[in-house]
Amino acid sequence: MRLRQAFVKLVRGIVVCLFVSCFSAVHADDGIVRAGDNLQIGIPLIAGMVSLMKGDSEGTKQWAEGALWTSVATHTLKFAVDEERPNGNDNNSFPSGHTSAAFQGAAFLQMRYGWEYGVPAYAAASFVGYSRVHGEYHYWHDVAAGAALAVGVQYVITGMGKSVRNLVVAPIIDRNAYGLYASMSY
C-alpha cells in the first residue's frame, strides 16, 4: 500500500510539472520545449523531495552528489567538445544538459527506490530528451550521451555505493606542459 501511495505521489508530481510547463513564461517557443525545460528541473527536484519525505538521509546525500557530479561532467564535456547546436545558436550541444539533469533524477529514483519510481521518471526524462531534439537544441547523440552520463554517474554513487567526496584535483603547470592531477579514495 505504501508503494502505491508513493507511486501516485511521484506521478502527480510529474503531472504537476507538465501542467505548470504549459503556462510557463520560459524562453521556449512551443509547449513541448517549454515542458522539457521545466521537467529537466522538476524531475531531479521531485527525486530530492521523495528522498527527504522518506527521511532517507543517505539517499539525499546520494541524490545531491549525483546531481553535482552529473552537472560537472556535463559542463566539462560541453566545454571540451565544443559542438555546434543544430539551430546554430552556440557550441554547447554535446552532451545535453537538460537530458543529463532529468536522467540523473530518474536514475536516482530507480536505483534507490525501485522501478515503481523509475518507470514514470524515466518516461518523463525521455520526454525531456525528445523536447531538446524537437526544439533543435540538440542532436540525438547529444541526448543519448547526456542520459548515459547521468545514469552512469548515478550508478557509481547509488548503485555501487561509491562516493567521490574524497576527490582531490590539482593543476600541474610546467614550463612546457599543463595538466590536471586527480586522485580519489573511497
Image (tube, grey):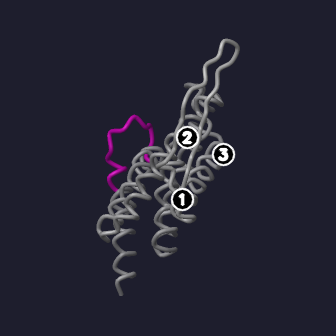
Say which quarter of the image contains residue 93. top right
Amino acid type shown at disc 3: Trp
Amino acid type shown at disc 1: Lys
Q: Is residue 23 magenta?
A: yes
| Callout 1 secondary element | loop
Along the viewing direction, whichever of 11 and 20 lies nearer the viewer: 11
Crowd rating for badge 2 (residues with CA inside 10 Å; few <14, some 14–19, many 20+): many
Q: Give the range drawn in magenta.
A: 19-31
User: Left of 139 or right of it: where is 9?
Assistant: left
Q: Nearer the viewer, mark 3 or mark 2?
A: 2
Q: Position of residue 6 (x, y in %)?
A: 36, 75
Q: Name the residue under label 3.
A: 140
User: Left of 184 or right of it: where is 53?
Assistant: left
x 61%, y 19%: residue: 173
Q: Is residue 157 magenta?
A: no
The residues bearing labels 1 and 2 have C-alpha atoms spaced at a distance of 19 Å
Amino acid type shown at disc 2: Thr
Q: Name the residue under label 1.
A: 162
x 64%, y 17%: residue: 174
Crowd rating for badge 1 (residues with CA inside 10 Å; few <14, some 14–19, many 20+): some
Q: State which tag comes first along the sequence, 1 or 2.
A: 2
Crowd rating for badge 3 (residues with CA inside 10 Å; few <14, some 14–19, many 20+): some
Give the vertical position of 61 relative to 138 (above or below): below
Give the vertical position of 183 relative to 61 (above or below): above
Q: Name the residue under label 2.
A: 74
The answer to whether residue 123 shows anywhere in this view is no
